[in-house]
């Protein structure tokens, strides 16, 4: 099962962005972790699904995809 969370920080140009997972933990990601053209249009507050890589090496997300019609209220 994929993890879910919302984008809390989105940086471009090889800098990490961050997802606040439903478990309350922050997960880092970079642009290479985004799947598909829709993922390139993500913005802060958007909800995503992702795979979490081995947490013993730091919490990192991979295979990030937007969740349709899901957006955190601000």
Image: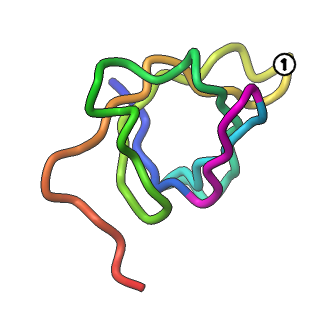
Q: Quadrant of residue 31?
A: top right
Colour logic: rainbow
Residue sitting at the far right: 57
* 33 left or right of 38 in image: right
- The quadrant in which the C terminus is found is bottom left
| 35 over 58 or under it: above or below | above
Residue sitting at the far left: 69
Residue 46 % position (x, y): 37, 57
- The quadrant in which the N terminus is found is top left
State the residue at coordinates (54%, 19%): 33
Secondary structure mostly taken by the magenta-highlighted segment of the chain? loop
Q: Quadrant of residue 8?
A: bottom right
Magenta stretch encompasses residue 13 = yes
Magenta stretch encompasses residue 28 = no
State the residue at coordinates (68%, 45%): 11
Number of labels in the image equals 1
Residue sitting at the far front: 13
Residue 57 % position (x, y): 86, 17
* 57 left or right of 6 in image: right
Task: Tell me if mark 1 has few (under 14), some (14-19) or many (20+) residues whose alpha carbon lies within 10 angstroms of its own.
Answer: few
Regarding mark 1 in the picture, which secondary structure is present there? Answer: helix
Of residues 31 and 52, the one drawn nearer to the viewer in this rendering: 31
| 11 over 6 or under it: above or below | above
Of residues 26 and 35, the one drawn nearer to the viewer in this rendering: 35
State the residue at coordinates (58%, 48%): 19
Magenta part of the chain:
8-14
- Find disc 1 in the rendering and name its residue: 56
State the residue at coordinates (44%, 65%): 45
Residue 7 % position (x, y): 51, 54
* 46 left or right of 19 in image: left
């Amino acid at each position: 099962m994929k993890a879910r969370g919302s984008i809390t920080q989105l940086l471009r140009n090889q800098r990490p962005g961050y997802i606040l997972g439903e478990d309350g933990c922050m997960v880092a990601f970079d642009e290479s972790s985004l799947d598909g053209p829709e993922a390139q249009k993500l913005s802060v507050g958007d909800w995503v699904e992702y795979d979490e890589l081995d947490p013993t090496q730091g919490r990192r997300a991979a295979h990030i995809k937007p969740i349709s019609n899901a957006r955190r209220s601000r």
